[in-house]
């Protein structure tokens, strides 16, 4: 199974979701699920993760240091596409995309550093729910 997590520029929310979901799946023994992330826009392609997102991940014991931003391609073969907010879901119309979390995951990019920690907490909660769902499908 291949899961793609999508946000706007692929430097904050979706890479955080990728790192967290991957770690939680491995912890649950579901290490055969591949998790990647991308953005709906291409202006950050090749960039590192936002340093504030990487710092929030480090504070919670995750490693996002290998991430490089990329743009979502409709031609990719993915089993599950998860959008970080309803705007991304609308941009992914025509795919089988679903929301990553019950509510939109807010973009912390233009806010204060603590916004990244709040977003990470929301991502961790949603990732736990996806682990349960994916375990049930295995």
Image (cartoon, rainbow, N blue to C red):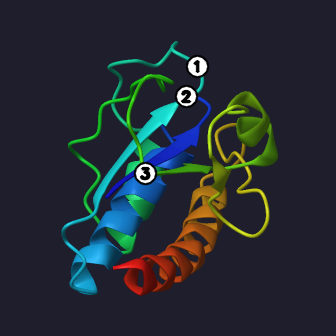
* Mark number displayed over residue 9: 2
Q: Quadrant of residue 16?
A: bottom left
Decide if residue 87 is in sight here: yes
Res. 61 visible in picture = no
Helix, strand or loop for disc 1? loop
Q: Residues within 10 Å of mark 2 (few under 14, many from 20)?
A: many
Q: Which mark is residue 41?
A: 1
How many numbered markers are drawn?
3
Frontmost of labels 2 and 3 is 3
Which structural element holds mark 3? loop
Q: Is residue 70 above or below residue 52?
A: above
Q: Does 54 sit left or right of 65 as displayed?
A: right
Q: Which residue is mark 3?
A: 79
* 54 displayed left or right of 10: left
Q: Residue at x 57, y 66 (%)?
A: 117
Check contact, mark 1 vs mark 2: CB within 8 A: yes
Q: CA distance from mark 1 to mark 2?
A: 5 Å
Q: Earlier in the sequence, mark 3 or mark 1?
A: 1
Q: Residues within 10 Å of mark 1 (few under 14, many from 20)?
A: some
């Amino acid at each position: 199974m291949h899961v793609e997590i999508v946000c706007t520029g692929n430097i904050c929310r979706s890479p955080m979701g990728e790192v967290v979901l991957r770690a939680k799946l491995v912890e649950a023994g579901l290490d055969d699920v591949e998790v990647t992330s991308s953005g709906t826009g291409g202006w950050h392609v090749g960039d590192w993760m936002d340093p504030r997102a990487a710092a929030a991940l480090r504070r919670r014991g995750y490693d996002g240091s290998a991430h490089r931003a990329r743009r979502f391609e409709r031609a990719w073969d993915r089993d599950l596409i998860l959008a970080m907010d309803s705007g991304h879901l609308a941009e992914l119309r025509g795919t089988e995309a679903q929301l990553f979390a019950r509510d939109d995951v807010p973009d912390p990019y233009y806010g204060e550093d603590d916004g990244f920690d709040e977003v990470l907490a929301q991502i961790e909660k949603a990732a736990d729910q996806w682990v349960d769902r994916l375990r049930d499908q295995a």
